[in-house]
Amino acid sequence: MADATGGTQLQAHIEIRDLTMAYGSFVIQRDLSFNVNHGDIFVIMGGSGCGKSTLLKHMLGLISPRIGDILYSGISFTRAGDSEKEAMRQRWGITYQSGGLFSAMTLAENVTLPLQLYTRYNSAEIVEIVAYKLALVGLAGYQNYYPAEISGGMRKRAALARAIALDPEILFFDEPSAGLDPISSRLLDELIVQLKESIGATVVMVTHELPSIFDIATNSVYLDNITRTMIGYGNPVDLRDHSDQAVVRQFLTRSAATANEDSP
Amino acid sequence: MDTQAPAFQLLGDNHGESSLVLSGDWVQGHGSGNFDALQSELLLRHPAKLMADGSSLGDWDSILMAFLLQCHNLCREEGIAFEARDMPEGVAQLLAVATAVETHQPPVESRGSLLASINPVHLLHKVSGNLQESLGFLGEVTIALSRLLAGKANTRFSDFKEFCYQAGPDAFAIISLISVLVGMILAYLGAVQLQQFGAEVYVADLVVIGMLREMGVLMTAIVMAGRTGAAYAAQLGTMQTNEEIDAITTMGISPIEFLVLPRMLALIVVMPLLVIYADLLGIVGGGIVAGGMGISPVQYITQSEGALSFTHVAVGLLKSLVFAILIAIAGCRSSINSGRSSAAVGQAATEAVVTAIVYLIVADAAINIIFQQVGI
Ligand SMILES: Nc1ncnc2c1ncn2[C@@H]1O[C@H](COP(=O)(O)OP(=O)(O)OP(=O)(O)O)[C@@H](O)[C@H]1O
Ligand SMILES: [Mg+2]
């Protein structure tokens, strides 16, 4: 990873070009252009309902862009064929805002599924790997629990275990720490950073949590609710101190003040 | 303290400025100001500015705020400046908070009035759209099925077994009850007519042919549409809400192979078995009524045997396969494309049952006509 001589390192890992997203005639965001570099922890920020989850779904190819394109290592995802898409997706790990764990399967089965599909491990090896992945997120021994039988925070971590099953190159998280207490949320942040560093992945994450943003993000984009486009792009600390948009500075400072008041 | 009903007065039109004087107690249980009256009067005068004056207000609660918010929104729509003055402490602040974020204007979609929903053109359009989607869905299922046969599909056998169990043995009780009763109804209906000709013994023929070709399979299919079809719709709809279907898709698994195929195959396997079971019980039910009419069991059985033919059984089984596919398509299609709310799940389940029953009856009629034409 540290080898910067390779040409691929100069190329952005993910490139968003002139993206306009809409549901029917309702335009959510327009003219989004930004790059996510290799090894970034890239945060998508913005007020509730501004289209963060929607942007993530576009990046995942679950929704097609109205206008514009999304490129992975220089290859257009929107124009890729089905088999190319599948190959790209195998290198991603994803957690969803509402969970996305298969509720009819145990945690072990959830983590097993991608391993069964895309690796050549035999079933005994898979059992060991599943135990290891669950242990990584602090859920050792919970193999046979169903998602409905564990707590909300544990579900978030279980989803993380499934996301890292294949040691992905890119991790996508939609609000990984929403709804967690400050300590668990901090632990989850640390876990994300550790996992990211150990597998050398790029992370794209949607979050409102200012502590997370300042602690771990290396780059970010701010989507505005009113003008329906991006009005901030850069390192969050720089944005907080130097953004020419008052809304962005407010988002990053005012809520920071309240967040500090909230914590003991 | 006496309370007074809420009231308002629209005063003065000096320099295009009207003032709205609010009085009385705007609290729960005393009604509210008549906003419609204010609206029509305001539209008539159309001042440049509306000043809401709260100096003579009594008590107030949310009902006042709701009224003021309506005024505010109306004024903004009409381009009238709105100002609230001399309001009790808190009102101005709450109003500022309530109006801070502009009202969301959902994109206009022709939601369809009641009249439009019974408009035949509109209805035809909807039905054809539904049919088109179902055909497309059937195409996708066929592709998935061919992948399954080639051994390339991501379909889990354990899911299939589980669905077979849910669709089959779990449905025995209700199928038993309904088929015995339907057999009795058929027998009763026939006996009353046949008695006039002294041909009661042919009740057995009527029951056997009626159950095998028509009632056994149709009643089973309707029970399955309500039981299993709706369950499928609810399961898949919940998965959509929970982003499970997104997770499956991004894992590179086709939701059709992973979710729809095991359900559909379970129905295809279970339906014919249930139909045979229903047929048998129906014939038993018919026998009970026949016994009551003085036909001896031996007579009934011999007569039934005479009526029993391979063709009748085959027709029933063929129908059961078609119906199984239709129920699965109606159940899965409506929900895999559903919205992402709990209301959408309910809607998908309703749509699944309604569509399935329509498909069943239409398909049954079509199959009967074809068989009649070719003389089966
Ligand atoms: N399936 C859909 N159909 C139509 N509109 C949708 C759909 N999903 C989301 N929207 C609309 O798109 C907008 C953005 O939604 P999105 O879920 O992306 O917001 P978000 O930024 O993730 O918000 P939050 O922080 O609350 O999760 C919202 O106004 C929402 O009403
Ligand atoms: Mg979201």
Image (spheres, coloured by chain):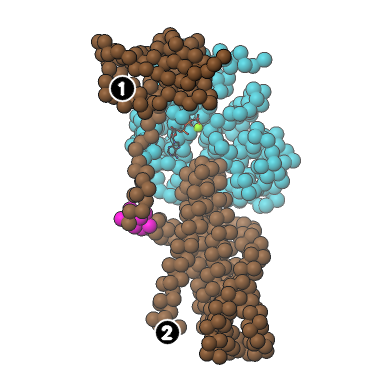
Chain colours: A cyan, B brown
- Mark 2 element type: loop
Residue A92 colored magenta?
A: no
In-image side of B30 versus A139 (left or right): left
Q: Position of residue B15 (x, y in %)?
A: 25, 10
| Residue drawn at point x = 33 percent, y = 53 percent | B119
The residue singled out by tag 1 in the image is: B42
Residue at mark 1: chain: B
Amino acid at the residue labelled 2:
Gly
Q: Position of residue B282 (x, y in %)?
A: 61, 75
Amino acid at the residue labelled 1:
Leu
Q: Earlier in the sequence, mark 1 or mark 2?
A: 1
Per the rendered image, the range of residues in magenta is B121-128
Q: Position of residue B321 (x, y in %)?
A: 52, 70
Residue at mark 2: chain: B
The single residue placed furthest to the front in the displayed view is B2
Q: Is residue B317 above or below residue A213?
A: below
The residue singled out by tag 2 in the image is: B375
Q: Gap between marks 1 and 2, in whole Å?
A: 75 Å
| Residue drawn at point x = 56 percent, y = 86 percent | B195
For marks 1 and 2, give the one nearer the viewer: 1
